[in-house]
Amino acid sequence: MPSNDRYPAKRNHSFRPDRPVTPETIASRYNNFYEFGEAKEEVWRQVGRFEISPWRIEIRGLVENPATYDLESLLREMPLEERIYRFRCVEAWAMVVPWTGFPFRHLIDKVRPLPGAQFVRLVSFHKPEQAPGQARATWYPWPYHEALTIEEAMNDLTMLVTGIYGHPLPKQHGAPLRLIVPWKYGYKSIKSIARIEFVRKKPPTFWNTVAPREYGFVSNVDPAVPHPRWSQATERMIGSGKTRPTLPFNGYAEQVAGLYRS
Ligand code: MTE
């Protein structure tokens, strides 16, 4: 677990969501983390055997500096800050969360991708003996894996996250290190990252493999494109239960819409 002395990190006040922060007691008891089961309200009770320290993170593929880092020492080189982001799940619920971490591009700059690297593939852990959902649901293509284009990964909004609500991430939120891509549906924001690979070709992703018609690769939040089984026009705030209109790119169009203009 990252040491406590770096929390709370300095808040970056450029990020001011238009709605109140979701209470921590609500956010930390309502989690999608299939490695620990499918019932959101039960995940926090199932994470007890999951070991997050020491944690190694492997960087490989098309980079000048492939390496396996001890996460604790890698983090010492990274500047931590707090950002309050909107967070939108594809299931049409939403939260507002103060994350602590650093822009992914700091790590990308350190490992120096080679010119052929077009995509970044992120892979979670596979430890069925510590993760009851992985042990039970053997039909899923474990370990959980996701990917972004290099341009998406380099965008300033894309964070590697080590903390939440001013302290290190609890296990149910994806300790010790997770991704946050606030303009995309939550399933892109992979938890408990064990490996990062720089690759030439678009990699397969977990939910796209499980249900290709329902979960795409790009997965930008878009009120105009319904999920095949429900509308995405509105979202339900966890906690207050208020319904709000869904914002294109989850409200981050100004920062990211340019990535998708050809
Ligand atoms: N990462 C892993 N490894 N396993 C998962 O099941 N679920 C995703 C994402 N990252 C998931 C994951 C989904 S669907 C969502 S909505 C968010 O994590 C939920 O993050 P939270 O529980 O911190 O709110």
Image (cartoon, rainbow, N blue to C red):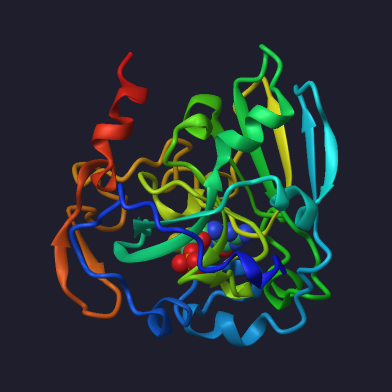
Give the side of residue 189 with respect to residue 20, left or right.
right
Image: 170 above or below 115: below
The foreground one among 106 and 40 is 106
Q: Which quarter of the rendered picture does the N terminus lie within?
A: bottom right
Q: Which quarter of the rendered picture does the C terminus lie within?
A: top left
Give the side of residue 197 with respect to residue 10, left or right.
right
Instruction: Give percent across and percent down for residue 124.
Output: 70, 54
The foreground one among 14 and 204 is 14
Instruction: Give percent across and percent down for residue 259.
Output: 37, 24
Give the side of residue 51 with respect to residue 183, left or right.
right
The residue shown at (25%, 55%) is 16
Image: 133 above or below 221: below
Total label count? Answer: 0
Q: Is residue 139 visible?
A: yes
Image: 78 above or below 21: above
The residue shown at (51%, 46%) is 159
Q: Is residue 194 visible?
A: no
Instruction: Give percent across and percent down for residue 122.
Output: 66, 43
The residue shown at (38%, 52%) is 12
Image: 53 above or below 61: below
The residue shown at (54%, 47%) is 102
Q: Quadrant of residue 170?
A: bottom right
Q: Quadrant of residue 168?
A: bottom right
Instruction: Give percent across and percent down for residue 7.
Output: 56, 68
